[in-house]
Image: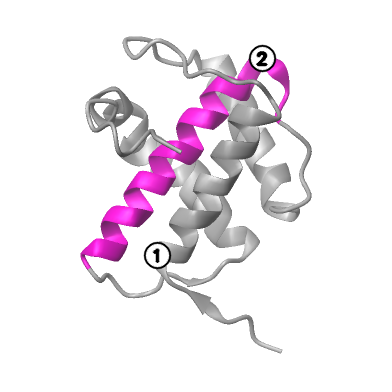
């Protein structure tokens, strides 16, 4: 059976849900808005994103040393996905491991990593 394509608003809800779990169950706070993750933290986040992509809804909380940066990633992805939904962009396809990795790893390194402090100015992007 072929997985059903998901719309951007559905993807935004998934990442908002993950952010809520990280924030509430993991008692995670955002890092300072003028901070950037180190290369080692980014690499650890990438590895954890690969694990997350295998069990999106059953994954444990990220390790404590990367939890705040994972919160940033999922919030940035939620905001990006919501924006794409408002622009009525076509579905990126089914919510597969490949798509989750592309969003959480490649989109992060492709530009969201450097845009996230600017996104913090948009209070809607980081509210749950």
Label 1: state its secondary structure.
helix
First reached walking from the N terminus: tag 2 or tag 1: 1
Q: Residue 84: horizontal and vertical position, in percent? A: 28, 60
On screen, residue 26 versus residue 94, left or right, reads: right
On screen, residue 119 versus residue 61, left or right, reads: left
What residue is shown at x 69% (from left), y 45% (from top)? 52
Q: Is residue 17 found inside the magenta-colored segment of the image?
A: no
Is 40 or 113 nearer to us in this picture? 113
Disc 2 target residue? 65
Figure label count: 2
Q: Are marks 2 and 1 in contact (CB under 8 Å)?
A: no
Q: Is residue 63 found inside the magenta-colored segment of the image?
A: yes
* Position above or below: 125 against 34: below
Q: Which residues are magenta?
A: 62-87
Q: Residue 111: horizontal and vertical position, in percent? A: 31, 37
For the residues labelled 2 and 1, the Cα–Cα distance comes to 30 Å
Q: Residue 91: horizontal and vertical position, in percent? A: 39, 74
* Position above or below: 12 against 10: above
On screen, residue 121 versus residue 59, left or right, reads: left
Disc 1 target residue? 8
Q: Residue 100: horizontal and vertical position, in percent? A: 56, 54
What residue is shown at x 40% (from left), y 14% (from top)? 36
Label 2: state its secondary structure.
helix
Label 2 or label 1, whichever lies nearer to me, is 1
- How crowded pointer 2 is (Cα within 10 Å; few <14, some 14-19, many 20+) is rated as few
What residue is shown at x 65% (from left), y 86% (from top)? 2
Q: Quadrant of residue 108?
A: top left
What residue is shown at x 34% (from left), y 55% (from top)? 82
């Amino acid at each position: 059976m072929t997985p059903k394509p998901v719309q951007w608003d559905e993807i935004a809800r998934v990442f908002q849900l993950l952010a809520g779990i990280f924030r509430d169950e993991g008692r995670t706070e955002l890092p300072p808005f003028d901070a950037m993750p180190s290369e080692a933290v980014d690499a650890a986040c990438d590895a954890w994103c690969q694990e997350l992509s295998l069990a999106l809804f059953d994954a444990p909380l990220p390790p404590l040393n990367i939890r705040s940066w994972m919160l940033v990633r999922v919030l940035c992805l939620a905001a990006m996905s919501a924006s794409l939904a408002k622009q009525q962009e076509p579905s990126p396809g089914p919510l597969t491991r490949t798509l989750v990795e592309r969003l959480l790893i490649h989109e992060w390194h492709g530009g969201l990593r450097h845009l996230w402090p600017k996104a913090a100015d948009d209070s809607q992007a980081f509210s749950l």
